[in-house]
Image (spheres, rainbow, N blue to C red):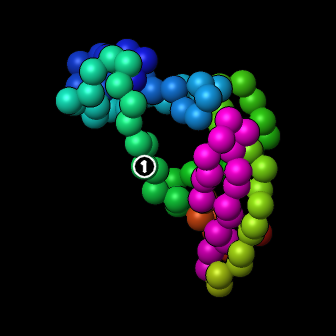
Amino acid sequence: CLGRSGAGGRFAIGSGEAVMPVAEAQGLAEGAKAVLVVRPERITLGAAEPGLLHGTVETAVYRGSDLVVHAALAGGGELRARLPGSCS
């Protein structure tokens, strides 16, 4: 936790290349480590920009209505995203 603001806080992700605000961080002290869980369907992929997570797509599996993407994050760790299976 990089800092607190009311019930929320700001967290460095990976090696600190990205910072994410979180609405609910009650019970975590500044400087504490935490596990961040994000629903895979809430993740979007795009061009690399400062302040965002950077990684390399390792696999992309089409599963009918979904495309499941696994990526290795540049600062270590992994990410799974579930995207719409349609290209439209």
Displayed quadrant of residue 25: top left
Q: Is residue 48 left or right of residue 10?
A: right
**Residue 41 image offset from top left, x and y in percent:** 52, 60
Please say whether residue 69 is visible from this viewpoint: yes
Q: Nearer the viewer, residue 27 or 68?
A: 27
**Residue 52 image offset from top left, x and y in percent:** 65, 32
Quarter of the figure that contains the C terminus:
bottom right
User: Is residue 78 shown in magenta?
Assistant: yes
Q: Is residue 64 left or right of residue 2?
A: right
Q: Is residue 9 above or below residue 44?
A: above
Please give the name of the residue rendered at 75% of the width and 67% of the height, measured from the top-left corner: 59
Amino acid beneath label 1: Val
Displayed quadrant of residue 8: top left
Q: Magenta region's main secondary structure?
A: strand
Q: Tell how many labels.
A: 1
Please say whether residue 88 is visible from this viewpoint: no
Quarter of the figure that contains the N terminus:
top left
Q: Say which residue label 1 marks.
A: 37
Q: Which residues are magenta?
A: 65-80
Please give the name of the residue rendered at 77% of the width and 56% of the height, measured from the top-left corner: 57
Please give the name of the residue rendered at 59% of the width and 34% of the height, measured from the top-left corner: 14
Q: Which residue is the extreme one toward the bottom?
A: 64
